């Protein structure tokens, strides 16, 4: 990359990759405005309609580590384009659907697009000049939260004033545009890993994850002590243990567990689970608080669209934080940014206890929490990539993204149970109580403090770095990441 063209070219690459990340994350909130009416729209029961939501979660959880490894082996840009095409096809399958089966199939295909985010971060490490890397990674990493925050009001507006089918036609257009932009603007990474794809490892990880995440999602309906819930958890544990045994013995593993248990990687991934929990707590609690009737005495009486608009600035804050986080990481290292992020998240949840009675207060504390998430999400990929070889960056980022997804799933289960069990009667309806919301915010604060404690144990700047790869922009970027 010549000096004359490096900056504008880099700007275009960053913009396209960040937009791709936001597009993928929009798929997570696309159906939120439809949840209450899904059984009617799809001519099915409420229990069956749940699969239209869960299919994306399960497919995305499997896609992130698998697509990361495929990217390391066969080309990150190539696999990113394939992910974008699958997302587009999934949207086209959902758009005309009026029954459950095509909707579930389409939503699963949309979930397979989730690999775009870790792949994009890995491409940035390989092709961007060092001075652009920190803020670019921060922007790409925070795109999941940005898309989620902006997608809720947009999806509500389209569903209410156009048609719910238009949500998926629009998603298909976004997917097609994303595919073309990646194809024509994003270069292929020069870094590839030798070896071949571990099909046995991929099947084992997929089975273990599905058997773990499914009862987390459905445990409150099935019963946490029911035979099916406990059976799935037990089967998941057995399969994941066998999977680990296989990964340690195969010459080309899907996930290099020896690298993953390095203290720097292991503790950062553990922090990612907890921070993912803290992030989703706000996304789960806040819309309900905003939309409860004001007559309850603590609900804020907002419509779905109004609630989305009150929450949208939080996504913009997360985006604005990425360059600030990059400067902090350049000066003090990514561990400092990650620690600061967890502290800010905890402060935001404590602020929520005082401001939850006002819509403007919700905007304020959700912006504070989002700022903390921005600092944290910007730092985690940098810490991970400083401890893994260049040839494993996409797989390592995919695993880190999976850890965040596991955190959000756990948050959904825990906080869903809290709000379902701490209720009040309002007319003929049973609603979450004010104490339930306060408990949820306190859990969010406590989890953020736990994340901060984990972060303090992560090795600092002088931690053992990944093996050096000489030559090319990727080597320069690798040196920059290790320095910061």
Image (cartoon, rainbow, N blue to C red):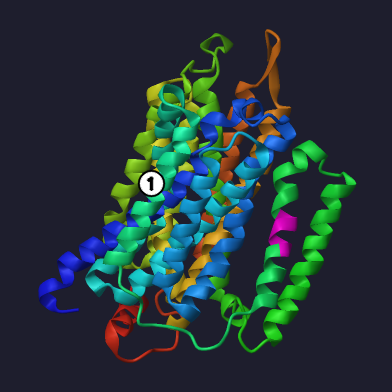
State whether residue 317 is above or below residue 397: above
- Quarter of the image with the N terminus is bottom left
Question: Considering the numbered disc 1 on the image, is that residue within a helix, a strand or a loop?
Answer: helix
Q: Nearer the viewer, residue 189 or 433?
A: 189
Residue name at image x 31 percent, y 55 percent: 322
- Does 357 sit left or right of 254 as displayed? left
Q: Nearer the viewer, residue 58 or 480?
A: 58
In the picture of the structure, the residue carrying the numbered disc 1 is: 173
Query: Residue 246 is drawn in which quadrant?
Result: bottom right
Q: Position of residue 432 (x, y in %)?
A: 64, 23
Q: Residue furthest right?
A: 227
Residue name at image x 38 percent, y 28 percent: 309
Query: Residue 253 is drawn in which quadrant?
Result: bottom right
Q: Main secondary structure of the magenta part?
A: helix
Residue name at image x 40 percent, y 62 percent: 379
- Residues drawn in magenta: 207-212
State whether residue 76 is above or below residue 377: below
- Quarter of the image with the C terminus is bottom left
Q: Nearer the viewer, residue 256 or 279?
A: 256
Asked whether the viewer can see residue 279, the reply is no
Q: Residues within 10 Å of mark 1 (few under 14, many from 20)?
A: some
- Does 442 sit left or right of 318 as displayed? right
Q: Position of residue 89 (x, y in %)?
A: 50, 52
Residue name at image x 48 percent, y 85 percent: 193
Q: Position of residue 347 (x, y in %)?
A: 45, 41
Q: Residue furthest left?
A: 4
Q: Residue furthest front?
A: 96
- Inspect the magenta stretch and tell me whether residue 308 lies in it: no
Q: Position of residue 129 (x, y in %)?
A: 24, 74
Query: Residue 434 is drawn in which quadrant?
Result: top right
State whether residue 297 is above or below residue 244: above
Asked whether the viewer can see residue 199, the reply is yes
């Amino acid at each position: 990359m010549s000096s004359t063209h490096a900056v504008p070219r880099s700007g275009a690459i960053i913009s396209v990759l960040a937009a791709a990340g936001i597009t993928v994350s929009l798929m997570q909130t696309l159906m939120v405005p439809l949840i209450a009416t899904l059984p009617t729209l799809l001519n099915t029961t409420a229990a069956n309609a749940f699969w239209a939501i869960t299919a994306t979660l399960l497919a995305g959880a499997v896609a992130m580590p698998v697509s990361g490894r495929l990217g390391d082996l066969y080309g990150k840009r190539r696999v990113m384009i394939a992910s974008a095409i699958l997302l587009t096809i999934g949207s086209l399958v959902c758009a005309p659907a009026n029954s459950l089966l095509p909707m579930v199939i389409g939503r699963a295909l949309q979930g397979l697009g989730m690999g775009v985010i870790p792949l994009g971060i890995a491409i940035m490490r390989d092709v961007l000049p060092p001075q652009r890397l920190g803020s670019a990674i921060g922007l790409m990493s925070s795109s999941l939260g940005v898309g989620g925050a902006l997608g809720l009001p947009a999806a509500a507006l389209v569903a209410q004033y156009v048609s719910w089918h238009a949500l998926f036609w629009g998603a298909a257009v976004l997917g097609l545009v994303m595919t073309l932009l990646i194809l024509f603007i994003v270069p292929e990474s020069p870094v590839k890993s030798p070896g071949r794809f571990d099909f046995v490892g991929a099947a084992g990880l997929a089975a273990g994850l599905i058997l773990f995440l499914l009862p987390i999602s459905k445990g409150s309906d099935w019963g946490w002590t029911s035979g099916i819930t406990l059976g799935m958890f037990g089967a998941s544990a057995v399969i994941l243990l066998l999977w680990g045994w296989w990964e340690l013995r195969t010459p080309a593993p899907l996930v290099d567990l020896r690298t993953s248990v390095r203290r720097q990687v292991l503790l950062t991934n553990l922090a990612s689970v907890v921070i993912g929990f803290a992030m989703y707590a706000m996304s789960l609690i806040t819309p309900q608080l905003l939309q409860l009737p004001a007559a309850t005495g603590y609900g804020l009486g907002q419509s779905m669209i109004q609630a989305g608009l009150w929450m949208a600035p939080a996504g913009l804050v997360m985006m604005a934080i990425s360059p600030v986080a990059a400067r902090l990481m350049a000066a003090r290292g990514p561990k400092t940014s990650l620690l600061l992020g967890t502290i800010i998240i905890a402060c935001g949840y404590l602020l929520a206890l005082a401001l939850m009675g006002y819509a403007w207060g919700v905007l304020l504390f959700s912006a504070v929490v989002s700022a903390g998430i921005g600092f944290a999400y910007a730092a985690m990929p940098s810490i991970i990539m400083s401890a893994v070889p260049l040839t494993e960056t996409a797989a390592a980022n995919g695993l880190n993204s999976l850890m965040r997804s596991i955190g959000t799933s756990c948050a959904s289960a825990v906080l869903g149970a809290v709000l379902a069990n701490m209720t009040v009667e309002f007319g003929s309806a049973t609603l979450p109580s004010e104490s339930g919301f306060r408990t949820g915010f306190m859990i969010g604060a406590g989890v953020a403090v736990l994340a901060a404690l984990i972060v303090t144990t992560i090795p600092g700047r002088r931690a053992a770095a990944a093996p050096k790869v000489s030559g090319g922009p990727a080597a320069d970027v690798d040196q920059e990441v290790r320095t910061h």
